Amino acid sequence: RALSGASGREAVASRENITLPPPDSGAPALPRRARARVEGVSPFTTPNSDFYRVDTGLVVPKVDATAWRLRIHGEGVTREKTLTFDDLLRRELIERDITLTCVSNEVGGPYVGNARWIGVRLADLLEECGVRPPSAGGPADQLVARSVDGMTIGSPVEDVMDGRDAMLAVGMNGEPLPFDHGFPVRMVVPGLYGYVSACKWIEDIELTTFDSYDAYWVKRGWAREAPIKTQSRIDTPKPFARPKADTVMVAGVAWAQHRGIDKVEIRVDDGPWEEAVLAAEDSRDTWRQWSYAWRATKGGHTLTVRATDRTGEVQTDRRTRTVPDGASGRHSVVVTVD
Ligand SMILES: Nc1nc2c(c(=O)[nH]1)N[C@H]1C(S)=C(S)[C@@H](COP(=O)(O)O)O[C@H]1N2
Ligand SMILES: [Mo]
């Protein structure tokens, strides 16, 4: 059906024919000091070509946007909708910077990236369909998104409709979604791990309950609900680096989407926690870069980072595995100063 022939020629052509209209609500200008000027830190905006990719697809679905449809139906839907790609483009478009994170990211791991997304506000569409969140008496507490390749991803209806910038995204960093990242349309919900929010190649949204349906990864032992944990990562120096005894710039990123990052601290060996310099906050849905000028002394040292989010919660030291709801613990890097 929507998956076109082996070559995906129609899909490629449909993508090339898309001109994304300028968003009605542009992303707020990036604060001038949102970037830490330290070599080796992850770029604030992750280029599409470097953006992590996590999915079960052996073959990336190639969907022809002109044939694509999205159906919204289920419990509490009083007016079902079927939308085309052009229907979406004709709606009010918002543009937002949102950092995506995978629940399978180990502490210090690479499965996190930040992009500027363009899309349609999902809550508006749901409201037009008559959907009310549970807090307003709606019968459905789970929104199950289904992709053309059969993936199912369940998100709390309450979160999607609570005012955050949950969207059906059509654009990523100024271009139509790359095929790898869900062309033509995917979901993005700030604050939730990808496996409970970020359905790529979406074609169906069903309103249901958590009691009556378990999505793909939930059937395999992962948590039903999974807000992103407060985390931080040292990007530089790299593990086992051999910097010279001098001032060494330690830098990285910290994230706690939809709560925001308030503070980042660095500890050298068993020393006191020292505050890092935080780059300006773009939004509470994006990561923040940080840096720390370390007066490095000769010998082997362990650098450890921890973040505090805007609820005041300090990133825990308690190590957990990624299963069932995301790794916790603190990232450390061992270096030898010459
Ligand atoms: N259709 C589909 N959507 C999916 C997945 C998938 O396997 N299939 N993986 C999810 C997971 S686990 C994550 S973390 C994000 C990753 O999005 P990205 O590959 O664009 O970084 O997509 C989510 N959406
Ligand atoms: Mo993920």
Image (tube, helix red, strand yellow):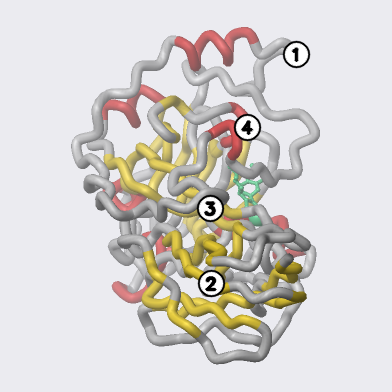
Instruction: For the C terminus, give its image quadrant.
Output: bottom right
Q: Residue extending furthest left?
A: 24
Pointer 2: residues within 10 angstroms few (<14), some, or many (20+)? some
Marks 1, 2: nearer the viewer: 2
Tell me whether the residue at label 1 lies in contact with that at label 3, contact meaning CB atoms closer than 8 angstroms: no
Sequence-wise, the earlier of marks 2 and 3 is 3
The kind of residue on which mark 2 rests is Trp
**Is 208 displayed left or right of 121 in the figure?**
right
In three-dimensional space, the C-alpha distance between marks 1 and 4, rounded to whole angstroms, equals 16 Å
**What numbered label is drawn on residue 41?**
3
Tell me whether the residue at label 1 lies in contact with that at label 2, contact meaning CB atoms closer than 8 angstroms: no
**What numbered label is drawn on residue 6?**
1
Sequence-wise, the earlier of marks 4 and 3 is 3
The kind of residue on which mark 3 rests is Val
Above or below: residue 19 compared with residue 91: above
Above or below: residue 18 compared with residue 258: above
- Residue 248, percent across and down? 56, 64
Name the residue carrying label 4: 180
Could you say whether the residue bearing mark 4 is in a helix, strand or loop? helix
* The residue carrying mark 4 has its beta carbon less than 8 Å from ligand 1: yes
Residue plotted at (32% across, 27% down): 89
